[in-house]
Image (spheres, rainbow, N blue to C red):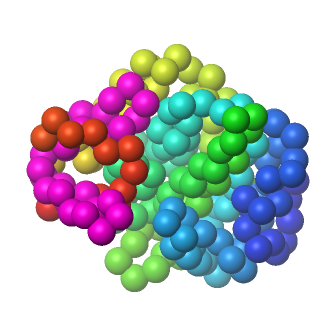
């Protein structure tokens, strides 16, 4: 379904059957993780939500799919950012229940906020590749998703700061666990805001 203006593609996708895809030219209340706003001028970004079966590593699988669709220079920052030249290119937001998952992906194409990156490619071309990669990676074995995420990661092996519920931890991001949790100096984090140091 292609719409010109929505509050958020997530809002529209929430009541649609599994297998649905919602694309919008503009979002008036686009959002990312932790209730952060996602803003872009009309037509300047790829804004899409996929309605999928729940999957314990869906956020990582979607990250891999989006990075592959954007090209070989794009890397992943845990838990859900796409980076181009170390600057944020896009992000993934997964909202899941026991029966369905809504996976929203936003990618800066023709415009980017200050300090962020833009891909500079036509939306239809990126969307076509993304749909193929989403089919591939959301159906891939979990260990293959984790392996490819590690290969594309710009977080692993770096010193990071993790902020969760007002608590800050610094250490080396060593690995991701079997459900996508970030292991920092032996301690697993299932959520949080990560800063590369």
Query: Across the whole image, how many numbered discs are drawn on residues?
Result: 0
Q: Residue at x 40, y 35 (%)?
A: 180
**In percent of the image, x 27 and y 39: which residue is there?**
188
Measured from the top left, where is residue 189 in percent x and y?
A: 31, 45
Residue 21 among magenta residues: no
User: Range of the magenta residues?
Assistant: 159-184
- Residue at image coords 42%, 55%: 81
Which picture quadrant has residue 25? bottom right
* Relative to 73, 51 lies left or right: right
Predominant SS of the magenta segment: strand
- Residue 42 visible in the picture: no
x and y, in percent, of residue 154 in the image: 27, 47
Residue 98 visible in this rendered orientation of the protein: yes
Q: Nearer the viewer, residue 116 or 150?
A: 150
Indicate whether 113 appears above or below 21. Answer: below
> Seen in the image, is 159 located left or right of residue 57?
left
The image position of residue 77, as x and y in percent, is 34, 51
- Measuring 50% from the left and 33% from the top, which residue is drawn there? 57
Nearest the viewer among 108 and 172 is: 172
* Vertical relation: 113 (above or below) 105: below
């Amino acid at each position: 379904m292609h719409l010109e203006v929505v509050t958020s593609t997530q809002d529209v996708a929430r009541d649609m059957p599994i297998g649905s895809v919602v694309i919008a030219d503009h979002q008036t209340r686009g959002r990312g993780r932790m209730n952060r706003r996602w803003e872009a001028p009309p037509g300047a970004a790829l804004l899409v939500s996929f309605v999928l079966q729940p999957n314990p590593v869906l956020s990582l699988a979607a990250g891999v799919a989006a990075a592959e669709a954007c090209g070989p220079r794009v890397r992943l920052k845990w838990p859900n950012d796409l980076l181009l030249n170390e600057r944020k290119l896009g992000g993934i937001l997964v909202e899941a229940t026991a029966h369905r998952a809504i996976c929203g992906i936003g990618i800066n194409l023709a415009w980017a906020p200050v300090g962020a990156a833009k891909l500079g490619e036509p939306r239809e071309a990126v969307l076509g590749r993304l749909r193929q990669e989403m089919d591939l990676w959301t159906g891939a074995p979990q260990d293959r998703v984790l392996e490819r995420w590690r290969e594309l990661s710009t977080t692993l092996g770096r010193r990071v700061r993790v902020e969760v519920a007002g608590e800050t931890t610094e250490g080396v991001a060593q690995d991701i666990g079997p459900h996508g949790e970030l292991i920092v100096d032996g301690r697993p984090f299932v959520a949080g805001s990560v800063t590369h140091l």
